Image (cartoon, helix red, strand yellow):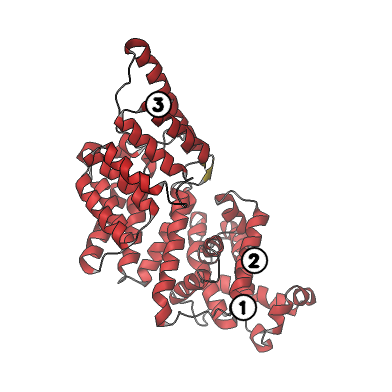
Amino acid sequence: MTNQPETVADTLHASAPLVLGRLVARHGQFDACEDAVQEALLAAAAQWPQKGVPDNPRAWLLTVAGRRLTDWWRSERARRDREAAVMAYEPESAAVVPAPGDEPPSSDDTLKLLFLCCHPALTAPSQVALTLRAVGGLTTAQIARAFLVPEATMAQRISRGKQRIKAAGARFAMPPPDERADRLRAVLQVLYLIFNEGNTASSGPHLLRNDLTTEAIRLVRALHGLLPDDGEVSGLLALMLLTDSHRAARTNAHGALVPLAEQDRTRWNRTAIAEGITLITDALSSFPPGPYQLQAAIAAVHAEATDPKDTDWPQIIALYRVLSHLAPNPMITLNQAAAIAMVDGPEAGLDLLKQLSKDERMAGHHRLAAVRAHLLEMAGDHRAANEAYQEAARRTTSIPEQRYLEARAARLTTRQVTFNSALGGSGGAEGDQAAGSR
């Protein structure tokens, strides 16, 4: 036994998908196997810090999880609770308990699990929850805390997801070749959603959820190890590393949001930036460009500017134009408008925003109001900018974003009153980034 408590969490996270994959490959019944692995992970989390990590932690987890399955399948109560599972159950498989040297888990099982958890029969929230639990090794309580919902709510979401997988007849296998590209896109989208929620929490008192960003990067790095010749996997990993490199500078000592233009760039993680730039440079030179690669290229341009005024905005605009053509999306248009304003002036950016006001997906989104406020402030229309900042603050459910937007509105109100008292006119504009970009 190795007595290194600080390695327990990392070991569990790395082992969870491999152990679950081996059990599902052996027994089928994803739902029962996933429950058994969770029990084994909880047992390990309780025992290993005191007794030490076993020399073969995956074999330990396989044995404990296998015994849990055997106990459940032999229990009359488990038979009543899992009537459907028992009907499909093959008796001879229950007696098999994984032995430490028997069929070691394969890294291919992690990829199969990702495809299974991102099955098209599931809703996006269920895909995220199942991926974090089955592949990430997080408990239901941890996932619930990350997404600020009650544990019972998250448990129901996970349970419904497993039931849908079973009802869909999904198999623990790689999708057929004609489905693989679409299913991989779903996997990347789920990992992207997990990262984005950690990078800018959609609600609650904190801007950042470092546990989610760290887990998303870990999972994408593992996926990149399995699919090193996929340009979009490389692009997503590069995008996450480049975005996360700003983490230390994105909030101040009080947890308040610091927008990109005001961040102390000496606090950016240059190691992560170097890795991200290498990844995206290699990907763009080796594969046809995809949406994640182009977003990573934009993030790389920002990362290369040691001072905001050195940002190559024309290059960013050119990348956004390619991106908007390749993968039209209102959020891309929103970011493109902000970039265009830096080169062609705020009025040009505001003209582009008018298109989004007609898009039902964006009409009530706080980020549209926030970017409009920023561009109005750049244009010197402080009264309209004040109203837009207040509108954005009312719409967001993120407390740090709300406080930031309210502070912008309050600053404009103070400036307007002071300037009007002195001159009877309107003041100048600044080029801050209202939405707190990365």
What's the distance in space between the residues labelled 2 and 3, CA to CA? 50 Å
Disc nearest the viewer among 1 and 3: 3
Q: Is residue 369 left or right of residue 352?
A: right
**Amino acid marked by disc 3:** Arg
Q: Which residue is mark 2?
A: 159
Quarter of the image holding residue 219? bottom left
Name the quadrant containing residue 151. Answer: bottom right
Q: Nearer the viewer, mark 2 or mark 3?
A: 3
Check disc 1: other Cα within 10 Å, few if <14, some if 14-19, many if 20+.
Answer: many
Residue at disc 1, secondary structure: loop
- Contact (CB < 8 A) between labels 2 and 3? no
Residue at the spot x=71%, y=76% of the render? 71
On the question of residue 269 being in view, the answer is no
Q: Residue at x 26, y 59 (%)?
A: 280
Q: Amino acid at mark 2?
A: Ser
Camera-side residue of 272 and 332: 332
User: Residue 372's x, y, as percent?
Assistant: 38, 38
Q: Are marks 1 and 3 in contact (CB under 8 Å)?
A: no
Which residue in the protein does label 3 denote?
A: 383
